[in-house]
Every structure is written in C-alpha cells, then in structure tokens.
Amino acid sequence: MLDCSWHLSPNQLLVNKNEVHIWRSTLNLPREKVEILAQTLSADELKRAQKFHFEQDRQRFMVARGLLRTILGNYLAVPAALLEFNYGQHGKPAIRDTFLRFNLSHSENLVLYAITRDRNLGIDLEFIRPMKEAEQIAKRYFSLQENAIFQALSPDEKPAGFFYHWTRKEAYLKAVGDGLAAGNNDFDDTVATKSDRAKQWFLRSFAPAPNYLATVAVEGNDWNILYLEPFTLL
C-alpha cells in the first residue's frame, strides 16, 4: 500500500495535463471555519445539509461541500459561492464549460478530493473497520478472482483486504459514471483487463491516514500524483 507525502497548497493553483491533485482534509474543523465554508454553499446545498438528523453529520456535509467549492474556486479564479454544479445520473458533480474534472469521497472524519483536467476520474475513501456483511458483499459484488483473494485472507487481514478491493471498484465505477450495480465482471482489480474499457484506466491505491484506504481511478496512463492539503486556502 502506497504511503503519501502531503504538502500544503501552493499560492497559485494550476493542474497540468499529466497531473492529478489529491487533496486531504479533516471534516472536524473549528466552528468559525465551518461558518465561513457554509457561507459558500448554495441554497440547495444548505437545504440538503438540514436534512441530516445529527449535527455532526450536518457539519461534515457542509465542510465537505464548502472545501470543494473553495478548492475549485481557487483553480478557476471564481468566488466559491458563485460556482454552479450539475449532476450526473448517479449524482456525480461537475461544472459545465470548464477543463477541470473532479470527484470527492469522505468517510468518518476525512475527506479526499481528486482533480485533473480533461480526463474523467473517480476517488473512493473508506475507514477500515470490521463489517459483518463483508462476506456477502464480496460474494455479490466482487469478481470471482477478487472474492477468491479476499476469502484466502486471515481474519485480521480481511477488513483491509475488503476495502482495498472495494475502493478500487468504487473509484473505477465513479470514474466511468456507473453505479455499483453496473456489475462485478466489468472490472477486476487483480488483472485490470476484464474489459477493453478497464484497460484505459490508471488506478492507484494509497493510505491517506492511519486506518484509511483510498483509490483514485483516472482515464489514461502516466499520471503524476500530487498530494495536497488545503489549510492555506482557508
């Protein structure tokens, strides 16, 4: 599993054609920063935030969306509050008429954003924990090879092993715009050659923090990955 070297964001944000920028942030920010980020949200996003029953979940949503707006606004030199998102069939956000392509994922207290230009991408993040349903999920959604590898792991290895396969599959499916129900045979991360479409994708799995696993999937090959933190932007 790849370890990452994280850097504070530069003063000027520019993503080159061969680069993928992955941003990492905690969702537990001080109240004053949460309030600043909340002011960048659209009326629809604020309405979605109010639907969360627990205050912690409401705050995490507002931080995740506010940070997305802040980061993208710095790339595009547009005030965060003025960005307008549209959404794909499975809820994947995009900004019309821009070279930027992006995706986000959050789990527990951590959020990741993946950003590149002119190529589709997806990212998935999971907090590693035991799951009672792991065996059933693996049987239903993993390919035969993935499930065989998972079943061969020791009990102590299975939580991380499960989320390794899961994040790779989820990142790929988010990148191509399919839901998980698209099937377990279109992509097999053990060989990455289950279909001609799967061969066109670059995948990298990494540990963004202790007890977390993540995978980014990007269209094409030969990518340079930069790992960034947004605290200088806040």
Image (cartoon, helix red, strand yellow):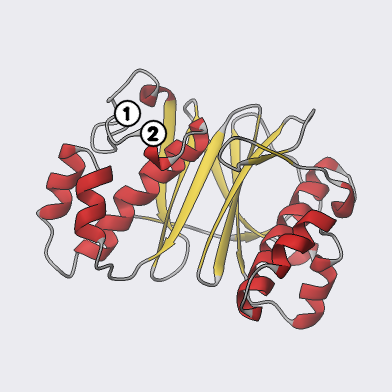
Q: Nearer the viewer, mark 1 or mark 2?
A: 2
Residue 41, x across and y down, in percent: 81, 59
Q: Quadrant of residue 24?
A: bottom right
Residue 22, x across and y down, in percent: 58, 50
Q: Residue at position x 33%, y 56% from top? A: 163
Q: Residue at position x 35%, y 67% from top? A: 128
Query: In this figure, which residue is indicated by the disc labeled 2?
Result: 182
The answer, for residue 125, to whether it is visible in the render is yes
Residue 27, x across and y down, in percent: 62, 71
Mark 1–mark 2 distance (CA, rounded to whole Å): 8 Å
Classify 87 as above or below 138.
above
State yes or no: discs 1 and 2 in contact (Cβ < 8 Å): yes
Image quadrant occupied by the N terminus: bottom left
Q: Quadrant of residue 85?
A: top right
Crowd around label 2: few <14 · some 14–19 · many ≥20 (10 Å): few
The answer, for residue 42, to whether it is visible in the render is no
66 sits to left or right of 175 = right
Q: Secondary structure at mark 1?
A: loop
Q: Residue at position x 63%, y 77% from top? A: 28
| Amino acid beneath label 2 | Ala
204 sits to left or right of 163 = right
Query: In this figure, which residue is indicated by the disc labeled 1?
Result: 186
User: Camera-side residue: 190 or 60?
Assistant: 60
